[in-house]
Image (spheres, grey):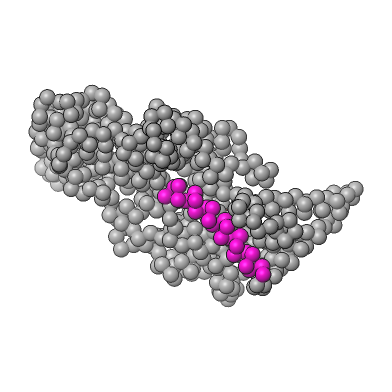
């Protein structure tokens, strides 16, 4: 549609200058005025002529009439005047032939705007915190982040996917104490992150119990100041040792990180995600002092109750904390050091950070600090936030341990799909493979169906249904195109046989793909692709039911329809891939 729209903008521009001498409008200006009519029986494209009245000093009706006579194009079946609108109808066969030909010629690059050539994007996403649960709250950063990476790769950018693991911090002091007290090697080797998490939960509970016991019976105010826990003291001491490179603690820390990573990688493998870098928070420990010094030298740091901060009053934001009273660094300090390192290492044209909207202020603050520090790439930093997730109506509560782990969510979806597919397929290995692709895909698709800022309530039943607007339905439609094509041979082209409305509607939907990709990229919004997939599936299924394909008696028409099926197959494959979905040929 884009090309048709561009061509029409050009034709209209020429007609405007010939009908109304002395007034010239750029193609871009006209392009921006063109609309897709809500009802296709009116036309495929419309020019609301009232938008031209001011420039041309005529009534919309007069303009429409004059232009209708002046515009001629092979691509057009008709031009009609309706009210102040000029409605264009495309020549169906010429249009479908061009779209299918374009898809065939460009293959897997069809739809790519190619805007990223020679440019680098770094994407910071997923980034779970070691020894804390990798739960459904991370679904957003993981799949939105990866989809944005795939979209940028598709547009020709060189992409660096970074998993900024939360692998440093006081929690490791607690974990070391808990491990030495209650843990054992075999159990952790067997239980993985779950065992680490239980150790972590246990020590937090015991610290709380010790603190409560230490101030039993004291009034609240006094209790706050006096509460004490030996375990908390021990944890701080162990973390201090770790910071001072104590061999034993370093070895334990590395082991905890490895155990966690191994398990996250199982989930990434299911999702088909690979990262280019796993440099986590710990990597930046020795890179922070230089940035803190720079802030100090530039006079940007102020002392506030012993802490070092950057005052952001002038920008309507609370202060950005750089150093705590005891001199230890904070989350923003580390992010600033990491951004400088990434700019020096990758020379990025864009750095994208995908996190929950709860962190929006954090990013706005440290982005501002980077700007104040005089780094001229400050405007290449982009935060992409997303809303909250609840499951079957229940909000997540990390503190009470009421979390749904990502791996459990996928496992459940896979096992439910397995039960359904095993009725049809005999081979259990094949069945498991399909169940993994469909089960995981169902969750991704469901999640990416909504605008990312929307808070969503996850309903497993809905996600897995084969009849709704779901992942299984989209994959099933793809498999349907495969089964048609399996029975054909060679390349196919749209011929000059007259097409039905359903054939043409499919060609039109296929032609919209490039526009949707550009929009998804501009808005950092993978859901634009998901919704496009649904449009394409709806158009293909209507075509499949209305039009005879392989059984069509008219040979030329059959040829055109096979070509349209092949084009749908190509575009669905690309589009599903861009939202991290697999495309099994059979379901
Ligand atoms: N580990 C953090 C968390 O789980 C997310 C890190 C996001 N990336 C960043 N550069 N701050 O909340």
Question: Which residue is found at the position 53% from the left and 56% from the top?
Answer: 262
Range of magenta residues:
248-272
Looking at the image, residue 418 lies above or below residue 378: above
Most foreground residue, 183 or 153: 183
Q: Residue at x 57, y 37 (%)?
A: 390
Is residue 85 visible to us here? no
Q: Quadrant of the C terminus?
A: top left
Does 1 appear above or below 232?
above
- Residue 251 figure quarter: bottom right
Q: Is residue 113 above or below residue 301?
A: above
Q: Measured from the top left, where is residue 99 in percent x and y?
A: 19, 40
Q: Quadrant of residue 43?
A: top left
On the rendered image, what quadrant is the N terminus found in?
top left
Residue farthest front in this picture? 427
Residue 271 image offset from top left, x and y in percent: 44, 47
| Visible residue check, residue 278 | yes
Quick check: 119 left or right of 428?
Answer: left
- Image location of residue 563, percent across then percent down: 18, 37
* Residue situated furthest right in the rendering: 217
* Front-most of residues 411 and 523: 411
* Residue 51 is inside the magenta segment: no
Looking at the image, which residue is at 60% across and 62% down?
255
Q: Position of residue 531 (x, y in %)?
A: 37, 37
**Number of marks in the rendered image:** 0
Residue 266, magenta (yes or no): yes
The chief SS type of the magenta part is helix
**Residue at 66% from the left image edge and 44% from the top image edge:** 401
Residue 107 placement, left or right of 256: left
């Amino acid at each position: 549609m884009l090309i048709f729209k561009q061509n029409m903008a050009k034709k209209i521009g020429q007609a405007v200058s010939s009908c109304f001498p002395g007034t010239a409008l750029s193609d871009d200006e006209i392009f921006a005025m063109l609309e897709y009519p809500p009802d296709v029986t009116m036309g495929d494209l419309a020019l609301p002529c009232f938008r031209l009245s001011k420039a041309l000093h005529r009534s919309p009706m007069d303009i429409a009439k004059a232009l209708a006579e002046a515009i001629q194009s092979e691509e057009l079946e008709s031009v009609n005047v309706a009210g102040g609108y000029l409605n264009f109808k495309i020549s169906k066969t010429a249009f479908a032939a061009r779209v299918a030909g374009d898809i065939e010629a460009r293959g897997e690059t069809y739809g790519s705007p190619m805007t990223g050539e020679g440019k680098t994007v770094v994407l910071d996403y997923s980034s779970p915190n070691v020894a804390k649960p990798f739960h459904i709250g991370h679904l957003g950063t993981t799949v939105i982040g990866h989809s944005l990476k795939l979209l940028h790769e598709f547009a020709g950018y060189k992409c660096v996917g970074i998993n900024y693991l939360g692998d440093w911090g006081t929690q490791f002091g607690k974990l070391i104490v808990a491990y030495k007290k209650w843990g054992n090697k075999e159990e952790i080797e067997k239980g993985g992150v779950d065992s680490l998490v239980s150790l972590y939960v246990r020590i937090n509970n015991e610290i709380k119990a010790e603190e409560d016991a230490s101030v039993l019976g004291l009034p609240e105010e006094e209790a706050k100041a006096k509460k004490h826990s030996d375990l908390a003291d021990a944890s701080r001491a162990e973390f201090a040792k770790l910071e001072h490179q104590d061999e034993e603690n370093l070895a334990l820390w590395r082991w905890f990180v490895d155990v966690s990573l191994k398990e996250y990688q199982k989930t990434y493998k299911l999702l088909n995600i690979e990262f280019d870098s796993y440099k986590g928070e710990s990597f930046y420990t020795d890179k922070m002092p230089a940035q803190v010094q720079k802030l100090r030298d530039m006079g940007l740091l102020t002392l506030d109750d012993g802490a070092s901060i950057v005052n952001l009053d002038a920008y309507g934001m609370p202060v950005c904390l750089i150093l705590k009273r005891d001199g230890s660094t904070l989350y923003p300090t580390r992010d600033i050091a990491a951004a400088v390192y990434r700019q020096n290492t990758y020379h990025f044209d864009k750095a994208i950070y995908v996190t929950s909207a709860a962190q929006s202020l954090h990013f706005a603050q440290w982005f501002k600090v980077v700007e104040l520090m005089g780094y001229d790439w400050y405007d290449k930093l982009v935060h992409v936030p997303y809303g909250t997730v609840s499951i079957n109506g229940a909000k997540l509560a990390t503190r009470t341990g009421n979390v749904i782990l990502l791996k459990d969510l996928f496992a459940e979806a896979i096992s439910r799909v397995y039960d359904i597919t095993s009725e049809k397929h005999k081979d259990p290995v094949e069945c498991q493979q399909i169940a993994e692709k469909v089960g995981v895909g169902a969750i991704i698709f469901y999640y990416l169906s909504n605008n990312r800022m929307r808070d969503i309530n996850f309903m497993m039943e809905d996600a897995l249904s084969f009849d709704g607007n779901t992942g299984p339905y989209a994959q099933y439609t793809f498999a349907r195109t495969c089964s048609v094509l399996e029975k054909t041979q060679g390349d196919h082209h749209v011929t000059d046989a007259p097409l039905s409305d359903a054939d043409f509607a499919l060609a039109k939907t296929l032609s919209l793909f490039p526009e949707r990709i550009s929009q998804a990229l501009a808005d950092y919004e993978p859901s634009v692709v998901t919704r496009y997939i649904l449009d394409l599936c709806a158009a293909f299924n209507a075509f499949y039911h209305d039009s005879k394909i392989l059984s069509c008696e008219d040979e030329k028409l059959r040829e055109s329809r096979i070509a349209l099926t092949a084009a749908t197959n190509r575009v669905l494959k690309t589009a599903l891939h861009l939202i991290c979905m697999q495309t099994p040929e059979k379901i």
